[in-house]
Image (cartoon, grey):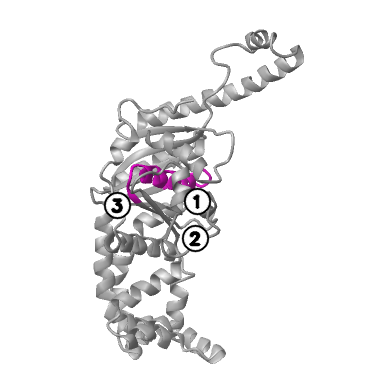
């Protein structure tokens, strides 16, 4: 069945024309990774050179693209496979999985003044922890990689698949938090000589660090001070990069696509996300409602369906089929109500409905079918 669209907003393809960065956000389990890949494939069908980036730890994007795994640098999808999926002419599709630590290392390498400074940072144990395990490191590396792909590669469109929506908000706010840290007074404490740092921390904290050093053999306060002093040469570059990323997320060539399903909780999350994007001055041009039930009784009563089927199958099977359609009809009516609510409250955002498909999307051909609902 053809996908329903908001007649007031126009098709999604028109809203995304001329965009260079598409950021897909939404709750978990709504098909956001599939939507990201399908959008990228659909744009490649239009003859554009497209990169799709995932920071989804489930690594489902690789299998959908017919790859064994994704590397931390863009890999080109085989042309023959793309032709089978409907990509003609000069269209290209590239894909990658974000490697958080490698992305941080690359940024340090670019911004460090010399090899000695670079090695001092990369080999510092505080840095190794910050670049892998600290909350928000994934989001920070994502915005860094997004900026790198935008500035240093010739992709016409970059499609970014983000974590579920709570993490997506972290992604949106990560540049501002990072900039606040680099320009805050707290950082200056660690850039000061270690004796002054200890006094500023206070006697109690200094005592804790001292005990930690005796027990582990690691002077944590000294390591922290060494780390931040080593970082002092790249802090200016980090701050400038952060401002540029913030500007990119709000630039006219960047668009956010909210992905949801018709279920109440994800639909409410989509409305919340739309509000946050608006508050942040970011453009949400598309809303994709995935896995919608569009088929049901078609306005008939179950007994009417039994009568219609009576000449085709036996009575018992006809009743079972009618009962099954009645169950789907309940879901279809619920989904229609949810879609109408979303369309009403997000007037001005292009709404596209992708129906519940008979099979899971597992390859490029499946992604191509989804792309037809999204962009045609």
Residue 307 magenta-drawn?
no
Residue 114 pos. (x, y %): 29, 85
Q: Which quadrant is home to the C terminus? A: top left
- The mark that comes first in sequence, 3 or 2, is 2
Q: CA distance from mark 3 to mark 2?
A: 20 Å
Residue 192 pos. (x, y %): 30, 85
Q: CA distance from mark 1 to mark 2?
A: 10 Å
Q: Are marks 1 and 2 in contact (CB under 8 Å)?
A: yes
How many other residues sit within 10 Å of disc 1, few (<14), some (14-19) or many (≥20)?
many
User: In what element is the residue under mark 2?
Assistant: loop
How many other residues sit within 10 Å of disc 2, few (<14), some (14-19) or many (≥20)?
many
Where 53 falls versus 180 (above or below)? above
Is 89 on the left or on the right of 55, as rendered? left
- The mark that comes first in sequence, 1 or 2, is 1
- The mark that comes first in sequence, 1 or 3, is 1
User: In what element is the residue under mark 3?
Assistant: loop
Which residue lies under the disc numbered 1? 65
Question: Quarter-wise, where is residue 351 in the image?
Answer: top left
Which residue lies under the disc numbered 3? 156
Residue 39 magenta-drawn?
yes
For the residue pair 274 and 67, the one nearer the viewer reads as 67
> Residue 70's mark?
2
Highlighted range, magenta: 25-49
């Amino acid at each position: 069945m053809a996908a329903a669209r908001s007649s007031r907003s126009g098709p999604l393809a028109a809203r995304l024309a001329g965009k260079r960065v598409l950021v897909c956000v939404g709750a978990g389990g709504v098909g956001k990774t599939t939507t990201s890949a399908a959008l990228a494939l659909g744009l490649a069908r239009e003859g554009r050179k497209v990169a799709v980036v995932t920071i989804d730890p489930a690594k489902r994007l690789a299998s959908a693209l017919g790859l064994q795994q994704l590397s931390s640098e863009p890999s080109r999808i085989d042309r023959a496979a793309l032709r089978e999926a409907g990509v003609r002419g000069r269209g290209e599709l590239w894909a990658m999985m974000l490697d958080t630590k490698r992305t941080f290392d690359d940024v340090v390498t670019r911004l460090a003044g010399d090899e000695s400074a670079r090695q001092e940072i990369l080999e510092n144990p505080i840095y190794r922890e910050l670049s892998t395990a600290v909350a928000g490191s994934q989001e920070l590396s994502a915005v860094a990689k997004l900026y790198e792909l935008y500035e240093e590669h010739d992709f016409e469109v970059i499609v970014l698949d983000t974590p579920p929506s709570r993490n997506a908000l972290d992604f949106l706010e990560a540049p501002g938090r990072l900039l606040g840290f680099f320009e805050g007074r707290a950082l200056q404490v660690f850039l000061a000589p270690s004796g002054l740092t200890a006094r500023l921390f206070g006697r109690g904290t200094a005592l804790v660090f001292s005990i930690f050093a005796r027990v582990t053999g690691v002077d944590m306060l000294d390591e922290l001070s060494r780390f931040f002093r080593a970082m002092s040469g790249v802090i200016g570059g980090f701050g400038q990069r952060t401002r540029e990323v913030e500007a990119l997320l709000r630039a006219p060539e960047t668009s956010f696509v909210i992905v949801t399903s018709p279920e109440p909780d994800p639909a409410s999350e989509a409305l919340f996300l739309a509000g946050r994007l608006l508050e942040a001055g970011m453009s949400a041009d598309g809303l994709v409602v995935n896995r919608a039930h569009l088929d049901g009784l078609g306005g008939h009563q179950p007994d009417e369906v039994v009568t219609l089927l009576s000449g085709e199958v036996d009575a018992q099977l006809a009743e079972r089929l009618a009962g099954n359609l009645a169950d789907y009809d309940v879901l279809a009516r619920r989904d229609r109500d949810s879609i109408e609510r979303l369309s009403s409250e997000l007037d001005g955002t292009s709404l596209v409905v992708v129906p519940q498909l008979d099979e899971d999307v597992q390859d490029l051909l499946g992604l191509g079918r989804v792309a037809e609902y999204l962009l045609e």
